[in-house]
Image (tube, grey):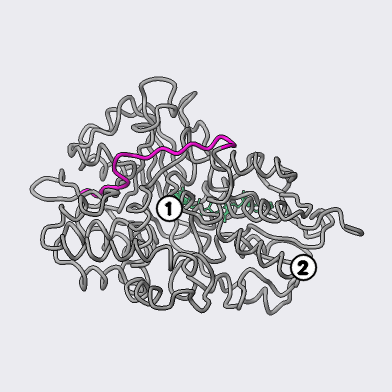
Amino acid sequence: MGKYDYDVVIVGSGSNGLAAAIYLQSKGLKTIVVEKESMLGGATKTTELTLPGYKHDVGAAVLPMAYSSPFFQQLPLEDFGLEWIYPEIPFAQTLGNSNNFGAVACYQDIDKTAAQLGADESTYRKFMRTRIEDWPLVSNDILAPIKIPENPLQFLDFGRSAILSARTFTRLKFKTEESKVLFYGAAAHSTLPLNSTASASFGLVLMIMAHLNGWPFPKSGAGQIIEALAKYYIHVGGEVKVNSAIEDFNQIPNSKVQVFDLTPKQLLTIKSLPLSALYQKRLSNFKYGAGIFKMDWALRAPVPFKNKILRKAGTVHIGFSSSEIENSEKIVNQGKLPGTPYVLLVQPSVFDHSRTPDSGHTVWAYCHVPNGNTQDCTKIIESQIERAAPGFGKLILKRHLMNTRQLEEFDANLVGGDINGGKQDITQLFTRPVAKLSPYKTSNNNIYICSSSTPPGGGVHGMAGFNAAKQVLKDHF
Ligand SMILES: Cc1cc2nc3c(=O)[nH]c(=O)nc-3n(C[C@H](O)[C@H](O)[C@H](O)COP(=O)(O)OP(=O)(O)OC[C@H]3O[C@@H](n4cnc5c(N)ncnc54)[C@H](O)[C@@H]3O)c2cc1C
């Protein structure tokens, strides 16, 4: 190794940082992960937020992208303690009719899902079957920066729908409110207004994941995937240093290459950063998206959803019509708080009894808020849940809240509460953080970025870390 203590230093231990570190260490390089916090994992951590023994996912909770990740699938994570739980229904959507107790489910089974969609039954079945058949042919291109597609026909076919706004896509494709609202619930994960270009891509990918593998999550909490990744990394010879915030470039251990699992904002605060003024200027133009207000509850019983479909779903999207969800996302992106927000709710303990030490339950939820907004959304979130589950409030043993500032204190990458490492609109979907042939490279040949601010963006999948690490290997070793 000569003059260097390490071949590569990875700054930040989120799922992308660990993925980059594992890949490079497995290729025989000497690597170390340097992490600011005392615990590894970034926005994927499970801790006791409410009562002793109650395990809550502070950040990510449901991991379909991790389960299907081409990189994570190569690793023997089950041998390092990872166990998957498959909720009976991957996700379900509330629906208002005479009361607010309607629901529609995205089952793993396409036919069963289509059977609820009335006049859209055969359209949905045909469309989704093609998407599932084509997925192995297009996924490599979707999970990477823009390049010439490996299978152009299938890619163009997918792209024709994905490039649309969720609103245009549902108007062109579906007739019934059931289909529209089900799709909107998945597409709204984008945190984009649903009339923005390419917002349909999120709905498509997430529904494909549901039909392919369900929406599984790790037993005992999402943090278990980090535990398994970290154990495997140590097993292959990697080193980890926690409680080490990098505030000055000179603090980084002596190394040939540095890979940052950071978003542009934190990278730019590092002193003596040897990046060109022009590149730093381009990074400073990077846009962040809407934030979230996150809540966790310890409950004495499961969420009392009136509709039994909702009781069987791991994830419940709350919003009582497609127009309510569309309006909620529009208002947030206009910088205001909606009165009836779209709420994402996860009820892991219904399927995973290791989450609590007794018969109680853990529930996780958030709504979107304008970036940096610190208003308390407890009331609007809990009222939305009450509409579908009257009596919810009476079951609360303890609640825990995080506004955008508290989220950023928990993980500096959550800038203004943005959980996707930057806005994922059409201008930043594939060309993040700046438009470059390899977006992982910076103006300095030895410095790389591997966070969710690079393609394919937010989510626990490790693909940004894996892609960046392949680039490092190709360029230097
Ligand atoms: C509330 C919430 C819910 C979510 N739900 C889901 C979900 O259900 N499913 C899903 O797939 N995804 C979900 N996500 C998104 C997912 O968690 C992120 O996309 C993912 O964590 C990104 O991984 P990363 O490695 O890019 O960055 P991060 O996980 O953010 O890791 C970055 C790391 O860098 C460290 N760091 C920052 N600055 C420094 C510094 N100067 N020096 C040293 N270290 C530093 C941080 O402490 C952190 O550990 C959610 C996120 C949140 C917050």
Task: Kindly identify the residue that appears in the image at 81 percent across and 62 percent down.
Answer: 256
Ligand 1 within 8 angstroms of badge 1 C-beta: yes
Q: Please tell me whether residue 92 belongs to the stretch shown in magenta.
A: yes
171 relative to 398 in the view: left or right: left
Looking at the image, residue 66 lies above or below residue 360: below
Residue drawn where x is 30% and y is 53% of the image = 342
Tell me: residue 113, above or below residue 309: below
| Residue most extreme to the top | 358
Q: Which residue is mark 2?
A: 476
Residue in the foreground of this view, choosing between 221 and 52: 221
Horizontal and vertical percent position of residue 255: 82, 58
The amino acid pointed to by label 1 is Ile
Query: CB of residue at label 2: within 8 Å of ligand 1?
Result: no
Tell me the distance, in whole angstroms, between the alpha carbons under discs 2 and 1. Answer: 39 Å
Q: How many marks?
A: 2
Residue 434 vs residue 441, the one in the foreground = 441
Q: What segment carries the magenta color? A: 79-94
Foreground residue, 393 or 34?
34
Q: Would residue 443 appear left or right of 56 to someone viewing this image?
A: right
Q: Secondary structure at mark 2?
A: helix
The disc at residue 292 is 1
Q: Is residue 343 above or below residue 437?
A: above
Q: Position of residue 4 (x, y in %)?
A: 87, 57
Classify residue 113 as left or right of residue 247: left
- Image position, residue 1 (x, y; %): 88, 57
Q: Is 339 one of the magenta-colored residues?
A: no
Examine the rendering and report whether any part of residue 438 can be seen: yes
